[in-house]
Amino acid sequence: QTKNDSMPPVPENLLKPMEIPARELFGPGPSNMTLPIQDSASRSLLGHLHPEFIKIMSDAREGLQYVFKTQSAYTFAVSGTGHAGMEAAVLNLLERGEKILALKTGIWGQRCANLAKRLDLQVQTVEAVEGNAVPFDEVKKAIESFKPQVLFVCQGESSTGVCQPIDGLGELCHQNNCLLLVDTVASLGGTEFDMDAWGVDCVYSATQKVLNAPPGLAPISFSQRAMDKIKTRKTPVASWYFDALELGNYWGADEGPKRYHHTAPISTVYTLRTALAEIAKEGIDAVIARHRKNSEIVYGELEAINLKPFVEKKEWRLPCLTTISVPDGVDAAEVQKEMMAQGIEIAGGLGPTAGRIWRIGTFGANSNEEKIRHVIKKLGEIVQTKRSRL
Ligand code: PMP
């Protein structure tokens, strides 16, 4: 056999146009891009150390400080999706053998525990009753007995729609020599978050939810307390790519001359800057208030079509992502499929909630009264046809 005989054939599929249907993305992410964000993705590339690009990074950093509500210099974006934010946080904040306590209100606390085990950390979890947040007293008891170096909390649990209250946890952690780490991938901009006022030591998010940008960057911020720990580690962070000091230098968080660390995903940084500019124009508090107001419309519309919210306690509902109990006898996946056939994505459950709930994300520009009424009207029509067959 000659070398050429073993060559794979020319991939015929690549010679045809790529098919991308128009779709209203009302699942748990990604959400739809706005036109300015989409346009910014197609602008010319710059070099990753060109002064004009460094200025764009610096603008984005300021925007992230504004949305996280922090003065912390170590505020930037990790190249990678939300998981990259989680990995960067855990890798930097902890050294091998140290302890992390993870609150479990769905799958994300479990994912963090899984990662921590791979990194040879000691892990404990506190599990909420399904559809509920973990009560403060249970967190306090677990911190006082386990004595972790880090508490992991997912603010917006996208698999259940639970919003875990954060206020008060910073104080509790600091009284117990513990750092507070918060996942805001599904919640940043969609509900209140105040890094400095709440004493959060590390927070990460992602670009493809409320920010309406493509997936690919994980905004992150480290407090002074977190940086003090990172700077006095006994062992170097076991990752070059996620090292907060190296990333911080590249993003301009320290005073030193900028070093090449990696090639930033240039176009994705453009989209992040554009997304943050849109939030700055509307005002972060106005964005949060809009999500809160529109979530009332979601619940009102659901009640009108006789669908029940999965999270019973109103104060534990995540305003930008609504979970709905699937009525008995209705096939959740079939309804999702029929919605998709009409160009609308809504999602089913994830992990233990699979088949039992629907998840409707109303992120950023999709948190819009008209769009919400349209999506829930369609859902109501489809569910009605299923019910009438029961
Ligand atoms: N945390 C939460 C709360 C999420 O909803 C997600 C994504 N659905 C992630 C982390 C992981 O983000 P990614 O898929 O962007 O890696």
Image: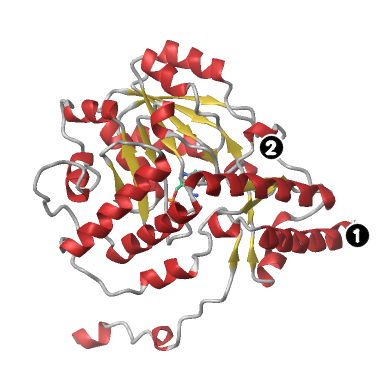
Apparent side of residue 100 relative to residue 209 in the rendered image (left or right): left
Apparent side of residue 278 relative to residue 359 in the rendered image (left or right): left
Q: How many marks?
A: 2
Residue 34 lies, in percent from the top left, at: 50, 66
Please tell me which residue is depicted at 27% across the width and 75% down the height of the picture.
Answer: 44
Residue 243 lies, in percent from the top left, at: 21, 42
Q: Which residue, as the protein is rendered here, is positioned at the far left? A: 257
Residue 361 lies, in percent from the top left, at: 60, 53
Between 236 and 282, the one lying in front of the other is 282
CB within 8 Å, label 2 to label 1: no
Residue 356 appears anywhere in the view: no
Element marked by disc 1 = helix
Please tell me which residue is depicted at 48% across the width and 37% down the height of the picture.
Answer: 193
Foreground mark, 2 or 1?
2
Which quarter of the rendering shows the N terminus? Answer: bottom left
Between 250 and 345, the one lying in front of the other is 250
Q: Residues within 10 Å of mark 1 (few under 14, many from 20)?
A: few
Q: Is residue 146 above or below residue 186?
A: above
Residue 198 lies, in percent from the top left, at: 44, 27
Which quarter of the rendering shows the C terminus? Answer: bottom right
Q: Which mark is residue 311?
A: 2
Q: Which mark is residue 388?
A: 1
Apparent side of residue 308 relative to residue 53 in the rendered image (left or right): right
Please tell me which residue is depicted at 31% across the width and 82% down the height of the picture.
Answer: 8
